[in-house]
Image: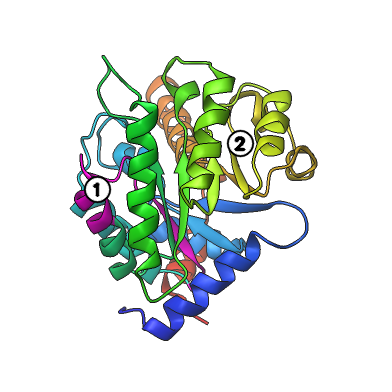
């Protein structure tokens, strides 16, 4: 299904408005068209892709540049086509080393029907996992500039990745997020924050909406509690995909170890799954 410009603009505005309403909202991370349909049917207000969820579905590791831009955007396009909801994408490091490549990624993301995307300051190099401060800010600026040239309000999320790469430096994380805000990012995101107090500190340090990843200790908090800390948007990253992998492994392991198929009783009934996938993707 080719998304019309009118429909994409409607989705883009709806996504922007979600960041201005009362309380926090959850953007649910789908990793393929089928999960996009499922999450849409459940009633979430917006979807996002997940680089790790996609990588795992392809039998690859995440964070090592093993999924290229074409694959990521093809996945995003399939998700966009499977839902009437706004869809934002995990665009990783922008799939390029310079401003031109990052700008091209934003433009191609919009062509795929996306209404937002995130750019991170991770390099993909284990020896030097985080871009320097200056380079990171320049890259966010390039993404913002490209987004502003589009004919729709494309939401740029800027990610400071310190805590995901063994650099638990909250002061530097805040400094980066503040600079990303000054560079024009619409949403700020520091995945891997260790506790509620770190979330509170980050949210208080910036004036733009903050996305919080519900993972690790933060997954023990509720949407309301994260909202009270200042979070405006909450994502689950690869969480749902790993739940699915965990359930599949437990069921398969039970068959292998005990010979029992009892775990299949927890599966979504075939008729229900089939009907869900056969339903309309749009309003």
Q: Judge the density around disc 1: few (<14), some (14-19), many (≥20) Cα neighbours within 10 Å.
A: some
Residue at the (53%, 46%) spot, across then down? 181
* Residue interval drawn in magenta: 84-105
Judge whether 190 appears above or below 47 on screen.
above
Looking at the rendered structure, the secondary structure element under dot 1 is helix
| Residue 111 as seen in the image, left or right of residue 229 | left
In this view, the residue in front, 253 or 35, is: 35
Q: Which residue is mark 2?
A: 214
Judge whether 190 appears above or below 119 on screen.
above
Q: Which mark is residue 99?
A: 1
Q: CA distance from mark 2 to mark 1?
A: 30 Å
Residue 135 quadrant: top left
For the N terminus, the quadrant is bottom left
In this view, the residue in front, 152 or 256, is: 152
Residue 16 quadrant: bottom right
Please tell me how many numbered marks the rendered image carries: 2
In this view, the residue in front, 53 or 212, is: 212
In the rendering, at what x and y percent does residue 155 appear?
48, 60
Residue at the (62%, 21%) spot, across then down? 194
In the rendering, at what x and y percent does residue 180 appear?
48, 42
Residue 265 painted magenta: no
Judge whether 264 appears above or below 254 on screen.
below
């Amino acid at each position: 299904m080719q998304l019309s410009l009118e429909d994409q603009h409607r989705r883009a505005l709806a996504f922007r408005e979600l960041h201005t309403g009362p309380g926090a909202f959850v953007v649910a991370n789908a990793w393929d068209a089928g999960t996009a349909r499922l999450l849409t049917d459940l009633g979430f207000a917006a979807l996002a892709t997940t680089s790790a969820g996609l990588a795992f579905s392809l039998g690859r590791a995440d964070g090592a540049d093993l999924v290229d831009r074409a694959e990521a955007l093809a996945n995003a396009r399939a998700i966009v086509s499977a839902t009437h909801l706004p869809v934002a994408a995990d665009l990783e490091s922008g799939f390029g080393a310079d401003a031109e490549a990052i700008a091209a990624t934003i433009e191609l993301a919009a062509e795929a029907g996306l209404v937002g995307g995130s750019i991170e300051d991770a390099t993909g190099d284990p020896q030097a996992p985080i871009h320097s401060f200056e380079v990171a800010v320049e890259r966010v600026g390039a993404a913002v500039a490209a987004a502003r040239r589009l004919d729709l309000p494309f939401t740029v999320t800027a990610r400071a990745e310190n805590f995901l790469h063994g650099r638990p430096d909250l002061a530097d994380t805040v400094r980066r997020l503040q600079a990303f805000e000054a560079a024009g990012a619409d949403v700020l995101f520091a995945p891997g924050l260790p506790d509620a107090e770190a979330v509170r500190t980050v949210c208080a340090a910036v004036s733009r909406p903050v996305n919080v990843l519900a993972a690790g200790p933060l997954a023990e908090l509720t949407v309301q509690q994260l909202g009270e800390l200042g979070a405006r948007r909450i994502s689950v990253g690869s969480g749902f995909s790993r739940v699915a992998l965990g359930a599949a492994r437990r069921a398969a392991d039970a068959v292998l170890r005990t010979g029992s198929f009892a775990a299949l009783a927890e599966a979504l009934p075939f008729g229900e799954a089939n009907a869900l996938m056969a339903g309309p993707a749009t309003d």
